[in-house]
Amino acid sequence: MKTTVSIFLLVLAAAAFADWTNIGPEGGPMYCGTVTATTPPTVYVASTSYNTPLLKMTDGGATWQPAGAALGNYPYVLVSHPTDTNRMYGVISSIFYRTTNAGATWSQTSLGSNTYGNDIALNPLNPQVIYVPCYAYDGTAWRMTSAKSTDGGSTWANTQLDTTSSTTLYSAAVDPVDTNVVYMGAYFGTSTVVFKSTDCGATWTQSVLPGNLYYIYSLYISPTDHNTVFAGTLYGIYRSTDAGGTWTQQCASNYNYRIVSVPDEPEVMYSAAYNYVYRSTDAGSTWTTCGAGVQGINIRLVLTVPGESSTVYCGSTGGMFKSTDYGATWDEINDGILIGKIPVVAFDPGAPGTAYAEFIDNAIFKTTDDGVSWERQPVVLSCGNVVNILIEPANPLRRWMFEGSG
């Protein structure tokens, strides 16, 4: 299958240079996203490329287009309002971003001086209440801090979860039944810890997970049993069936950046776990890998869609991918995503119109028609990103590729 690629081509028009035209490769590094319950559903994704607007898709993956204004940097997380489909939230460093017009424009509020957020958790019964797990400098060290807003993100009040340990919080979740209960995931020293509040974040207690699992990247609460909580850590998915009291490992997957379930079939769950998407069909008891067809690495993004039980999206350094069979197989859906990082372009001196392009953390692509279309090339051994490609003029069948790491 041929894919269009991301190179910038300078065209000389008359006596002056014209604007740059993006001819590929399609795709690019994806970091986070969200789905709004419009009809049809709208999928929003954010790239790690700087000063890039959110991209949105309303046609099931056929095409993507910019959603509106760029945020200047990439958000660490995107969250949709549960009832207002025009309202979304994001966090970048110490700034909380809000849009009320589906991403056309964004407003900003500060989480506090020297306070940096990593996640967003909305109270599903009162979305004016928002929690952001943070790390904040108190003059002596960086402390685990919960930033809380009761007015939809206009103002923030901060509470230290622990006044002695120096570390950061990575994830948060609000109990969908008893919204007085809030969880936050942390790592400090050699302890992987879930903090729990039963009074809307005023006070916190901690539960230590077994072993040194490092970061808790994601927290998820079962919508059918709110005492069942999942923690996605660096070294596995852990489950508590007693509201965070005790924890057992359910999956050995690494880098569990995001855990979600299918809205209409909550027993089906997915975890975005770096090189793989993991799936459970028994409410998180057992997990297996899925993802035939996903290209690139660093899968941080997985999204499910209301009303479309078998549909799931994931994002990697290669762009966006869609499955309509519960993750068994995936198709690339990068039409309109033109943010790939291309450090190397090499032209074949013996074949006019033929060139090779290195797409960072994705693949090498080849064109034989001056960039009208591109084709993904087989993986070159096990090397990393290529920093140069040479084609011998005297022997055009021989190519030399230089890997950045040696």
Image (tube, rainbow, N blue to C red):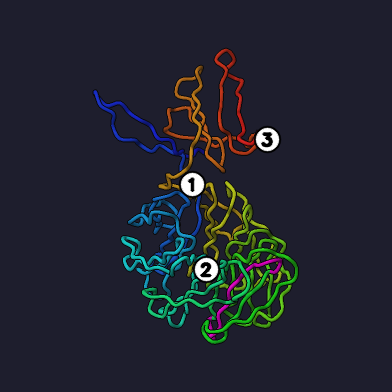
| C-alpha separation, residue under disc 2 versus residue under disc 1 | 39 Å
Which callout, 2 or 1, points to the residue nearer the camera?
2
Q: Is mark 2 on a helix, strand or loop?
A: loop
**Where in the figure is residue 63, as x and y percent of width and height?**
40, 51
Whether the magenta-drawn stretch holds residue 10 is answered as: no
Q: Nearer the viewer, residue 306 or 237?
A: 237
The residue positioned 73% from the left and 65% from the top of the image is 212
The answer to which image quadrant residue 370 occupies is top left
- The amino acid sitting under disc 1 is Gly
Q: Dot 1, crowdedness within 10 Å: few (<14), some or many (≥20)?
A: many
Q: Earlier in the sequence, mark 3 or mark 1?
A: 1
Which callout, 3 or 2, points to the residue nearer the camera?
2
**Where in the figure is residue 289, as x and y percent of width and height?**
67, 58
Q: Dot 3, crowdedness within 10 Å: few (<14), some or many (≥20)?
A: few
Instruction: Tell how many labels.
Output: 3
Q: Dot 2, crowdedness within 10 Å: few (<14), some or many (≥20)?
A: few
- The amino acid sitting under disc 2 is Gly
The residue that disc 1 covers is 28
- The amino acid sitting under disc 3 is Leu
Q: Nearer the viewer, residue 2 or 187?
A: 187
The residue positioned 33% from the left and 56% from the top of the image is 69
Residue most extreme to the right? 211
| C-alpha separation, residue under disc 3 versus residue under disc 1 | 22 Å
**Where in the figure is residue 117, as x and y percent of width and height?**
49, 66
The segment highlighted magenta reads 176-191
Say the numbered circle drawn on residue 381.
3
The residue that disc 2 covers is 139
Would residue 8 appear left or right of 3 to someone viewing this image?
left
Would residue 316 appear left or right of 98 to someone viewing this image?
right
